[in-house]
Amino acid sequence: MTTFSDRPLGGALFRAISLAPLLYPTSAPAQSFSTVDSAVRVGIDQGVYPGAVVVIGRGDTVLYAAGYGHLQWQTSSPVPSPDSTLWDLASLSKVVSTTSAVMLLVERGRVDLDAPVARYLPRFTGGRKSEVTVRMLLDHTSGLRSYVEFFRLAPTRDSAISLLYAEPLRRPPGAVAEYSDLNAMLLGLLVERVSGEPLDTFATREVFRPLGMVESRYRPASGVAGRTAPTGLWKGHPSRGVVNDQNAVRFGGVAGHAGVFATGSDLARFARMWLADGATRSGQFVQASTIHRFLSHSPGSGTRLLGWDSPEPHPIGSCPYGTLLSPSAYGHTGWTGTLLWIDPQRDLFLVFLTNRSYAPKVGHSISRLRAVRAALSDAVVRAVPQR
């Protein structure tokens, strides 16, 4: 059964939850995560975010899960729960939903990583776009610029998509990686074109349900608003259940780069599948060889894998992954204050979800969050002995 332990923590209720019985039995010895708690509390004390959850685990067990602070700055608001609180994942949607959907289509022979994007999206034309492959969208070497405010330029989803297709390349395809929302937006459209159904429909049936991610969804219904972390203010009121990314809003709440809401526990299930080379309790989600293909570098991709990022060999400043992960580690971050990393060599993962974008009490909150992520990542590695 699930076990709970409550204790006061800086004026807020701290709840540590053992999730292992929900996933796999565990006989992991008790160990201290006090330095992890301290690293997370720094962000609350500095006013970076009002609440957070952390889930730490290995491929066969969850070692630690905890909620911190509150969903809003008022102490009367709920304490976040790793099991039930829904968080706007922001750019974690790129790996949790879009990359996973593409990976399934690749394994099933419906998408070729090295085929031109135009094979699947005929409207993606002009200049050297015929040279851009699906792989280049995944590792961000397509040559597209990082961001465009389509929501300001286009009044509808269809007109925004037209502008996306018309966007010119800024660099030669395959030359160098530049992280871009546009790549993931195109990948979301590619999934829809190949599968013949909306991205959220395909991802829910083919990714979330098979992995046991029962809380993960796009466009949360109003019935779960009370347990959804707010990510902004609208006319002075907390904004809940509406994706924070305005381009995703213009796409109707479902886009390749943003839009997924999920719990910490769901992301733990997702991470454990990757650590297990595609295996789950119910069977093989994808083959190990497919997992390894998506964790490979291409010429010019730098730290970028297929969908994922990897830590710098010699991090400078506040790398969100800290300084202690192994060379095999990979992960992703999100604008709203989210982080997921997976370290196969250490058999270790970290899920860290916050609502940094909701009414931070300090300036430059994204920079301060970067420092918190780095300190937390190192604290997790130090707290969990390497096998």
Image: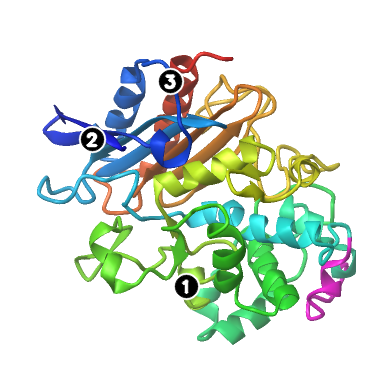
Give the structural element (helix, strand or loop) at label 2: strand
Q: Name the residue that disc number 3 marks.
A: 379
Q: Quadrant of the C terminus?
A: top right
- Kindly state the secondary structure of the residue where label 3 is placed: helix
Question: Disc 3 and disc 2: Cα gap in Å?
Answer: 19 Å
Horizontally, is 229 left or right of 368 in the view?
A: left
Q: Is residue 159 above or below residue 104?
A: below
Q: Is residue 175 magenta?
A: no
Q: Is residue 1 left or right of residue 255?
A: left
Query: What is the three-letter code of the residue carrying label 1?
Result: Gly
Nearer the camera: disc 1 or disc 2: 2
Position of the N terminus, as image quadrant, is top left
The magenta segment is 115-128
The residue beneath circle 2 is 15
- Characterize the local packing of mark 2: few (<14), some (14-19) or many (20 or more) Cα atoms within 10 angstroms: many
Between the C-alphas of marks 3 and 1, the distance is 35 Å
Q: Is residue 107 left or right of residue 314?
A: right
For the residue marked with disc 2, what is the amino acid?
A: Arg
Q: Where in the figure is residue 269, as x and y percent of width and height?
A: 51, 44
- Where does residue 274 sit, x and y in percent of width and height? 63, 40
**Residue at the disc numbered 1:** 253
